[in-house]
Image (tube, coloured by chain):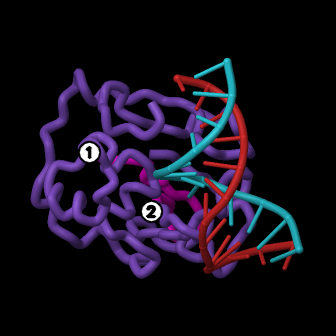
Chain colours: A purple, B red, C cyan
Amino acid sequence: MEAYLGLEDLAAHASRGLTGRTKPLFGPPGHAYVYLIYGMYECLNLVAEPDGIPGCALIRALEPVTGVEAMRHSRPTARRLEDLCAGPGRLTIAMEITRRHNEMDVTHGELTVRRPLDDGRDEIAVSPRIGVNQCVDWPLRFYFRNNPNVSRR
DNA sequence: CAATAGATCATCT
DNA sequence: GATGATCTATTGC
């Protein structure tokens, strides 16, 4: 995931202030911010600051642990399981997340399946964010060092 | 392998 | 009217 902050973070949509698109970023935490990028991909963010303060986490990749068949159906071009959700645009296709999920509360579902954390495999590493042209060196990308599902290793 | 081109459109100026 | 928090295919070494 990558953190995107507020006014001081020129790589963040919220740095342009409150607009039609960025409204969810200024809302309460635990809600989705889904936007269209490059006219063809959707990106999922989770609002992560108190109401009134912009800030979110861009979900750049995830490890599929359930629903793999459905995800492969949604994204049949993925050759390997590790590529299925390795990328912000890829995982939204696999999970069929679109702007219709924008502003949705994501705190009221039930987490049915997860993989136990493995301290060897799940060591958290930090790096600059990918694909940004502002605040290029800010260490706001967090990923599992040895996880093959990470985007752009 | 790395670098680049092109697809495509909502949002903001 | 310009610009992307991207991805895939293609080119070239």
Determine the chain carrying the residue at label 2: A
- Give the left or right position of residue A70, taking residue A49 as reference: left
State whether residue A69 is above or below residue A104.
above
Q: Residue at x 13, y 39 (%)?
A: A116
Which residue range is magenta in the image?
A46-63
- Give the left or right position of residue B7, taking residue A30 as reference: right
Residue A52: x and y in percent read: 58, 70
Residue A9: x and y in percent read: 69, 50
Q: Residue at x 38, y 62 (%)?
A: A92
Question: Which quarter of the rendered picture does the N terminus of chain A lie within?
Answer: top left
User: On residue A30, which mark appears?
Assistant: none
Q: Earlier in the sequence, mark 1 or mark 2?
A: 2
Question: Which kind of residue does numbered mark 1 sit on?
Answer: Glu
Is residue A51 or residue A4 the one in the foreground?
A4
- Give the left or right position of residue A124, taking residue C12 as reference: left
Determine the chain carrying the residue at label 1: A
Identify residue for label 2. A44
Give the secondary structure at mark 2.
strand
Rounded to the nearest angstrom, the CA distance separating label 1 from label 2 is 15 Å
Question: Which kind of residue does numbered mark 2 sit on?
Answer: Leu
Question: Which quarter of the rendered picture does the C terminus of chain A lie within?
Answer: top left
Q: Is residue A135 part of the magenta span, yes or no?
A: no
Residue A51: x and y in percent read: 52, 70
Give the secondary structure at mark 1.
loop
Examine the residues drawn in magenta and state their main secondary structure.
loop
Identify residue for label 1. A63
Q: Residue at x 40, y 55 (%)?
A: A90
Residue A10: x and y in percent read: 73, 52
